[in-house]
């Protein structure tokens, strides 16, 4: 018996077994891709089954009928991958004219169709391929814009180019050589590995190794060489390969590598541009205003506006609360807050709610810190916003910050409750234990309010022993429960030299979404009236404005 008759089946069986193992391994890897796992593993599994059916049916004559079922799992796999591409977010800007590139696969299809043995399966596959390209093209362009991870430069070309090329190869007259079957099998598994690895690189945000890019190009060129070799083995001779076929092959040989390296080139260019821009911004922040001998509020606001505008073109304006709401540019309903710990510095306005949000939030932290340092170093009067004893806002600070509380409430449709709080025993503590004890009591009550209120709430030392509180996203009933809890906390406070328990009285007003600062001012008067009514009933009470 010829040794080849034994070795070839054994080799084929080993290759088939290895392919089955690779199928399960790659499918298992695809299940670990997070949100993409179900669609990626489903598409990969069915494409792997298609490959196994094709190889078994083509290499083992006894199972030749299996190759007839190859197309069914191929279609199902395409469907999974179409849903995968459709589930990923599209870039912020996508030029529709790029869909004109669909003319290339359409042209290749029209050139190849007259010469293939399986016209109907190829037509179905071609329709699925066009739908896949329709969803994948914006994802590929996101890489060009620098809005997608590098891994996309691997899995999208591997998915689209190999799927189209392999479908054409399988559709040609089935007169395959053993070598070509083995080569296309290796290309098949390598392409599936590239698909999984590319998705893994994208999911984790890892850089793309050169080996992956090289393998994408090698795989694509290999499958097109196999197409030409398959054509030669069919009833057509190499001399009868038409110029259209040569043109399609040569053009495809260029399209494959270019589809990988062009987006990476632009990605690199944009990354370098972003890095240069960030370096410029950080450099300007480091020397922020030191070049000016006598900076004014207007010059500070203008420089901040220019910095943010340099970072994002959608920045519409800047407002600085620390300088009497000085505004440069336009005010809009979108933007981010400039805040350094508990001190509200201002707001940056944008033309929409999504553009550059992450970039601006990162930059706002750096800018706020730097602005606070500059203000301190230049000894601006912003210190007058806070009470030196308690660290709370004073009336001046309230007048500056209340605009933002109203604006936030209107945007988020929050109810706001105004509370006027009074320490019942403050005068007795001052008279019996001295002003130092009174100061200590003010500090401890201020600390109690800070601990029991949220960052979005505003606490103001209104004067003497009276505090003004603006409770965000709270109606009157919710506010009453909050101050019931605070009252219990305050009763546990102890002041040296003072034996009696400390109690508070509270007047509440509002509980609705304010239309303007004037409404807040009206509610303050109403809360003050409610406080006086509460005091007349005795200490340790809370009353609502009727």
Image: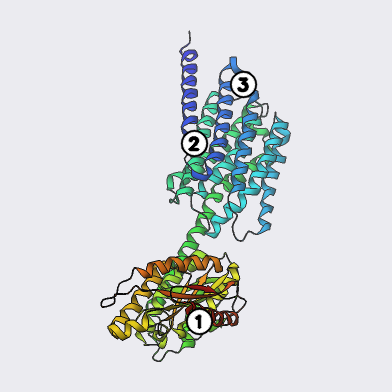
On screen, 536 above or below 474? below
For marks 1 and 3, give the CA distance: 91 Å
**Residue 424: x, y in percent?**
40, 78
Direction from residue 129 to residue 397 in the image, left or right: left
**Quick one: which residue is furthest to the front in this view?**
537
For marks 1 and 2, give the CA distance: 81 Å
| Disc sitting over residue 190 in the figure | 2
Which residue carries the number 1 mark?
532
Name the foreground residue: 488 vs 62. Answer: 488
**Quick one: which residue is furthest to the top in this view?**
1
On screen, 431 above or below 369? below
Under circle 1, the secondary element is helix
Quadrant position of residue 445: bottom left
Which residue carries the number 3 mark?
66
Name the foreground residue: 416 vs 262. Answer: 416
**Where the C terminus falls, by quadrant?**
bottom right
């Amino acid at each position: 018996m010829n040794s080849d008759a034994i070795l070839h089946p054994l080799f084929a069986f080993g290759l088939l077994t290895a392919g089955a193992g690779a199928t399960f391994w790659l499918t298992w890897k695809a299940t670990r891709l997070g949100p993409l796992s179900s669609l990626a593993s489903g598409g990969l599994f069915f494409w792997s089954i298609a490959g196994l059916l094709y190889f078994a049916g083509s290499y083992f004559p006894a199972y030749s009928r299996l190759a007839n079922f190859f197309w069914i799992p191929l279609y199902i796999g395409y469907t999974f991958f179409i849903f995968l591409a459709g589930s990923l977010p599209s870039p912020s800007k996508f030029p529709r004219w790029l869909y004109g590139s669909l003319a290339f696969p359409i042209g290749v299809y029209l050139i190849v169709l007259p010469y293939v043995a399986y016209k109907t399966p190829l037509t179905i596959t071609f329709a699925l391929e066009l739908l896949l390209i329709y969803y994948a093209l914006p994802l590929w362009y996101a890489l060009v814009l620098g809005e997608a991870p590098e891994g996309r430069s691997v899995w999208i070309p591997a998915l689209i180019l190999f799927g189209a090329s392999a479908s054409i190869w399988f559709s040609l007259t089935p007169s395959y050589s053993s070598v070509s079957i083995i080569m296309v099998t290796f290309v098949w598994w390598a392409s599936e590995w590239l698909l999984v690895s590319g998705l893994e690189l994208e999911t984790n945000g890892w850089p793309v190794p050169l080996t992956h890019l090289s393998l994408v190009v090698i795989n694509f060129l290999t499958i097109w060489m196999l197409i030409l070799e398959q054509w030669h083995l069919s009833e057509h001779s190499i001399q009868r390969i038409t110029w259209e076929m040569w043109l399609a092959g040569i053009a495809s040989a260029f399209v494959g590598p270019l589809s990988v390296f062009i987006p990476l080139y632009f990605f690199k260019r944009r990354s370098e541009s972003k890095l240069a821009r960030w370096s410029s911004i950080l450099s300007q922040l480091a020397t922020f205003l030191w070049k000016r001998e006598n900076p004014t509020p207007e010059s500070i606001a203008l420089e901040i506006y220019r910095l943010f505008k340099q970072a994002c073109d959608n920045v519409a304006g800047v407002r600085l609360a620390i300088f009497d709401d000085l505004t440069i540019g336009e005010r809009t309903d979108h933007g981010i807050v400039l805040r350094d710990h508990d001190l509200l510095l201002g707001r940056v306005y944008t033309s929409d709610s999504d553009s550059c949000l992450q970039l601006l939030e990162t930059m706002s932290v750096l800018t706020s810190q730097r602005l606070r340092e500059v203000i301190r170093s230049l000894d601006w009067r912003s210190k007058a916003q806070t009470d030196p004893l308690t660290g709370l806002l004073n009336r001046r600070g309230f007048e500056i910050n209340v605009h933002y509380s109203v604006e936030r409430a209107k945007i988020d449709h929050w109810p706001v409750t105004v509370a006027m709080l009074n320490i019942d025993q403050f005068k007795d503590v001052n008279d019996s234990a001295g002003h130092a004890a009174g100061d200590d009591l003010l500090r401890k009550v201020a600390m109690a309010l800070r601990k029991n209120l949220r960052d979005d709430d505003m606490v103001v030392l209104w004067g003497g022993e009276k505090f003004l509180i603006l409770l965000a996203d709270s109606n009157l009933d919710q506010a009453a429960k909050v101050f019931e809890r605070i009252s219990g906390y305050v009763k546990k406070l102890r002041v040296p030299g003072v034996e009696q328990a400390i109690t508070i009285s509270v007047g509440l007003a509002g509980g609705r979404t304010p239309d303007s600062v004037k409404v807040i001012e009206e509610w303050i008067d109403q809360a003050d009236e409610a406080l006086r009514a509460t005091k007349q009933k005795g200490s340790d009470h809370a009353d609502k404005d009727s």
